[in-house]
Amino acid sequence: ELNELRFPIIYREFGVLQDSGGAGEFEGAPGGICIYGPRKDPMTLGYVCDGIVFPPRGVLGGKDGHNLVAKKLKLYPSGKVKESDIPTMGALTIKKGEFIKSIHAGGGGYGNPLKRDPEKVRLRVRDGYVSLEKAKNEYGIIFKHENDPEKLEVNYEATNQLREELENKGEHK
């Protein structure tokens, strides 16, 4: 909002991208999404993108983070949106009705996700950083009261059973 007050720029979206951090005993930092463009006059920006082809890698059993995405969006009066890739570095001029979509890379995870404290995963799910699906598939966590984030609670019996099954499959080593 401060940038919108100080500069002739408008943000259409700005936030944290769910499930973008690599799963691990120590979770990678989440990435973000930002869609912005000029209010009325053309705007030229210089940029460098890293992580489009190779996402941030997880280590010692940790999963990779989400890769970076950089696109140019053209909005038409009909509401149609055309997306096009932009080079990984350079300068680009965009006009009113055009926007840059930048999905920032999430960090890679460290260590086996099945060793992450279930309570830490619960808090990340409650706060919207991690989906229920990722909590189950990557961390092996089963919850009670899944439909109410404020009442979300770890089902330790089911979690221990699922984690044992996932460990035996060998996908989380």
Image: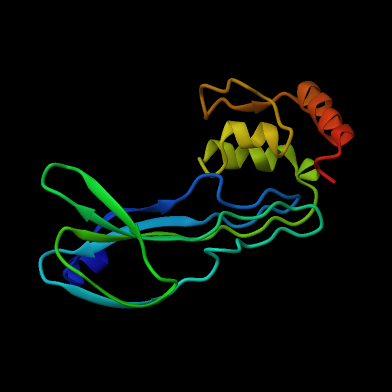
Could you tell whether 128 is left or right of 8 in the image? right
Establish if 169 lies above or below 66.
above
- Position of 20 with respect to 8 (left or right) is right
Please tell me which residue is depicted at 15% across the width and 72% down the height of the picture: 42
**Horizontal and vertical percent position of residue 95:** 16, 67
Q: Is residue 33 left or right of residue 63?
A: left
Residue most extreme to the right:
168
Near-viewer residue (4 or 69): 69
Number of dots carrying numbers = 0
Instruction: Locate residue 70, reporting x and y percent.
Output: 41, 62
Q: Residue, x 65% and y 27% (percent of image)?
A: 153
- What residue sits 68% from the left and 61% below the top? 57
For this rendering, which residue is in front, 49 or 34?
49
Above or below residue 50? Residue 149 is: above
Image coordinates of residue 143 in percent, x first then y, are 66, 25
> Where's the N terminus, which quadrant?
bottom left
Q: Residue at x 53, y 60 (%)?
A: 105
Coloring scheme of the render? rainbow
Question: Toward which corner of the image does residue 172 lie, by quadrant?
Answer: top right
117 with respect to 147 (left or right): right
Where residue 146 sits: x, y (%)? 57, 23
Along the viewing direction, whichever of 98 and 143 lies nearer the viewer: 98
Residue 89 drawn above or below residue 98:
below
Location of residue 45 by image quarter: bottom left
